Amino acid sequence: MSAPATESFRRIRMPMSREDARSLRAGDMILLDGEIIITAGLPTVQRLVACVEEGREPPIALHGASLFHLGSYSQDGAEGGLEILYMNPTTSTRFNPQMPGLIRHFGLTAVGGKGGLDAASVSAMAEVGCVYLSFLGGGAPLHSAAITAVREVAYPDLVAHYRLVRLAVEGLGPVTVGIDAHGNSLFDTLQAEAQGRMAGILEGLAASRAEGLFSKILTFSTIRASIGLSDPLRGEG
């Protein structure tokens, strides 16, 4: 089955407007055009939290922006800039403790990565009008091809994929709205469905193991009988 053409997806201008964020629903698939801000580093996010706590502005403006948990695997350019080699998502749950405060303080309209965020972040997102976008794990060629320019780089003392980077992108995605601005989460829905199926799965596994054990016993008895040996499992001497 061929993948749907990119023309079939809604295109969203970044930074995402509050109106666009609230118009999206969990499960929607979209393409992103414009500017995004990314980092894969927990130390980076901790520095942003320190900016909030100390009343300082971050080195890249974040008010009303997007903040994606994407690692830009990069190298320093010849003229001091950053050359993006490829970009891939990291697990967002690593940042669960920091994200609610950042979402509220900066009024973020979009966050994202892979794996979703916890209930505290979902609540903060619903308060301010913010969505969580799920990026394809292992989709580095797809994500990287959408980068058109590196606009700004902060925290150069950190390794490249931990730096805070502002990128220009065109047709980034498709990405899935994993959590919408109304508190609906695909991750919660899938977890509930999995839990509902778990008992049946475990029963099936137990039945398969029992059937497999019976088959092995039967095979053992048959082999011994075929070569004229007694079968202790049948009480033969």
Image (tube, rainbow, N blue to C red):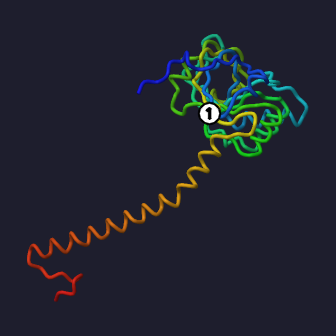
Q: Is residue 227 left or right of residue 19?
A: left
Across and down, in percent, residue 151 comes to 70, 14
- Mark 1 closeness class: few <14, some 14–19, many ≥20 residues within 10 Å: some
* The N terminus - image quarter: top left
Q: Residue furthest top?
A: 79
Secondary structure found at label 1: loop
The amino acid marked with disc number 1 is Gly
**Percent from the top left, x then y, of residue 195?**
58, 55
In the image, what residue occupies the spot 75% across and 36% down? 182
Q: Position of residue 114 (x, y in %)?
A: 61, 36
Question: Which corner quadrant of the image does residue 169 belong to?
Answer: top right
Residue at the spot 80% in from the left edge and 21% down from the top edge: 61
Q: Nearer the viewer, residue 223 or 197?
A: 197
Which of 122 and 40 lies nearest the eye of the viewer? 122
Towards the viewer: 155 or 91:
91
Residue at 48% in and 61% down: 202
At 53% from the left and 57% from the top, the residue drawn is 198
Q: Is residue 90 above or below residue 174?
A: below
Give the residue at mark 1.
Answer: 27
Residue situated furthest right in the rendering: 55
Picture quadrant of residue 87: top right
Q: Residue 149, percent across and down?
A: 64, 12
